[in-house]
Image (tube, rainbow, N blue to C red):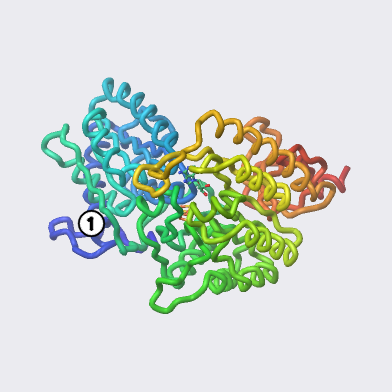
């Protein structure tokens, strides 16, 4: 990991090395020369603002991008009135794209006032040709574009951007795919005490509505040794909770030269001393093994929470979605998990209005929601993604029908989750204290092992610790609590 390479020791007169990550460290040193010159002229360092759209994968990528920028001397800021602004984009649904275009328009206004600022775009949206064409035609103030496969190249691309002769010329580098995994670049964590850890990249499932396999490429797993080494370094740096990240963590390890299962990886992670909590995201019902359930059941560190996307409760629609399980199989799996780990919290994703979804299909989704009793569910309106098989399917469901079903589902989800997710009220639970409550600074906010949020009075120095909290009251989707020690002292 980072800290092993001293930028001052890099020979800037030599040719850039061909191999990674040495090549990117070379360009980081070059970017730093530019930063030092900037400091000399302006009397202070340049500022950089990264805006992240989308999922946990993007959040993790943004930490890597921030790590590189901070290492070369940029000061991170939340304001888009900055010397370097980078949007890390999402394209999973059309509204994600629209949000980026809207924000980009506003950024163009800022750039009119400060023409020297650099505007960069990266992430999933950039893997789509129509998007890049649109940016080239209508957002000509953008300076730099790169895709999901070459995030690690930020130093090299930024250098190219800073050194270009014509400041109006767009620098663009978008790879179609890669099997490359570049290790050992810096990262700037958002939280000191918890961190995401990529265990794999890409997805091979090709659910028929989903654009992810096209924009994030084929599935490839990181070497377990590298993963464990990263976790050990994070723990040495104060991290107590890791979230193992992959589009479908249950198929981890299949592409390795020496394949291991996800459950085996979890067992290795559990052995890291000082690590208190392990989470992971996302699971695919078709690949969730008995071995994993057994390992979770026995573990003291693996949190009792499974995010298990259902997508639809109709076997007919699930087949059209290419999900590879039926309604019955999902129900059976959920029952098996709850039986083995009674305290588990199950959460899910559901899409409403997939092409051809009838009222009967939708009723089956409602029924599964009721039967499983999810702690919470993310509900989405089906969004056409160009290039996916579902985009060209007949009988797309009319917008008003989808909207009406969506509202009914949301109510159903709220009712069922309110019934089940407050079950720990009046018990003492371990809480990882995460931050001062954003609405009331007298309160702290943390998470139970099963991921439910709890707010309670407390001092900010508890942030990052695991504290015993009595859950006084359940408020629909979060608890209000009291630190056990404070309760006893009353
Ligand atoms: N339309 C609506 N929702 C989608 N998702 C993925 N693709 C689409 C789409 N085209 C949802 C799925 C997935 C979550 C991350 O986003 O429910 O689990
Ligand atoms: Fe998309 Fe399906 Fe892969 Fe999830 S498993 S990223 S929904 S293709």
Crowdedness of circle 1 by 10 Å Cα count: few (<14), some, many (20+)?
Answer: many
Q: Is residue 155 left or right of residue 235?
A: left
Residue at position x 71%, y 43% in the image: 454
Q: Residue furthest bottom?
A: 258
| SS at badge 1 | helix
Residue drawn at x 39%, y 65% as measured from the top left: 220
Quadrant of the rendered image containing residue 376: top right
| Residue 425 screen position, x and y as percent | 81, 47
The quadrant of the picture occupied by the N terminus is bottom left
Residue 421 at least partly seen: yes
Residue 297 position by quadrant: bottom right
Up/down of 322 relative to 73, above or below = below
Figure quadrant of residue 218: bottom left
Please state the horizontal and vertical placement of residue 342, each as a whole percent of the image: 76, 61
Give the residue drawn at x 50%, y 64%: 231
The C terminus lies in quadrant: top right
Residue 240 seen in the figure: no
Residue assigned mark 1: 26
């Amino acid at each position: 990991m980072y800290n092993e390479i001293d930028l001052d020791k890099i020979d800037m007169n030599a040719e850039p090395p061909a191999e990674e990550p040495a090549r990117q460290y070379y360009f980081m040193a070059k970017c730093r020369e530019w930063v030092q010159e900037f400091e000399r002229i302006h009397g202070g360092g340049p500022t950089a603002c990264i805006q992240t759209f989308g999922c946990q994968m993007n959040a993790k990528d943004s930490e890597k991008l921030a790590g590189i920028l901070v290492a070369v001397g940029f000061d991170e800021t939340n304001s888009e009135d900055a010397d370097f602004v980078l949007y890390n984009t999402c394209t999973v649904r059309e509204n994600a794209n629209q949000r980026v275009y809207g924000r980009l328009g506003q950024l163009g206004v800022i750039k009119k006032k400060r023409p020297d600022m650099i505007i960069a775009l990266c992430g999933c949206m950039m893997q789509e040709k129509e998007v890049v064409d649109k940016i080239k035609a209508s957002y000509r103030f953008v300076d730099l574009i790169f895709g999901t496969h070459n995030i690690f190249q930020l130093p090299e691309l930024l250098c190219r951007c800073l050194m270009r002769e014509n400041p109006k010329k767009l620098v663009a580098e978008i790879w179609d795919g890669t099997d490359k995994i570049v290790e050992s670049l810096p990262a700037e964590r958002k939280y000191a005490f918890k961190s995401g850890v990529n265990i794999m990249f890409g997805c091979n499932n090709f659910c028929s509505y989903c654009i992810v396999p096209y924009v994030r490429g084929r599935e490839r797993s990181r070497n377990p040794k590298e993963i464990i080494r990263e976790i050990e370094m994070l723990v040495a740096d104060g991290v107590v909770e890791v979230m193992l990240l992959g589009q479908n963590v249950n198929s981890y390890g299949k592409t390795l030269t020496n394949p291991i299962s996800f459950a085996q990886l979890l067992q290795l992670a559990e052995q890291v001393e000082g690590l208190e909590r392990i989470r992971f995201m996302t699971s695919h019902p078709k690949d969730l093994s008995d071995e994993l359930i057994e390992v979770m059941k026995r573990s003291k560190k693996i949190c009792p929470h499974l995010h298990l996307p259902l997508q639809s409760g109709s076997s007919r629609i699930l087949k059209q979605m290419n999900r590879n399980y039926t309604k019955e199989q999902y129900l059976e799996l959920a029952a098996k998990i709850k039986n083995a780990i009674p305290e588990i919290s199950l959460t899910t994703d559901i899409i409403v209005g997939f092409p051809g979804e009838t009222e009967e299909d939708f009723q089956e989704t409602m029924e599964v929601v009721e039967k499983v009793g999810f702690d919470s569910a993310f509900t989405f309106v089906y969004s056409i993604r160009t290039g996916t098989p579902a985009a060209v399917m007949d009988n797309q469901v009319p917008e008003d029908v989808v909207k009406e079903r969506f509202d009914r589902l949301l109510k159903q989800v709220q009712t069922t989750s309110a019934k089940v997710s407050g079950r720990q009220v009046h018990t003492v639970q371990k809480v990882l204290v995460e931050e001062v409550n954003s609405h009331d600074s007298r309160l702290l906010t943390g998470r139970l092992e099963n991921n439910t949020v709890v707010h309670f009075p407390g001092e900010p120095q508890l942030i990052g610790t695991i504290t015993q909290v009595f859950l006084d009251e359940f408020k629909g989707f979060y608890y209000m609590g009291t630190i056990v020690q404070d309760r006893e002292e009353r």
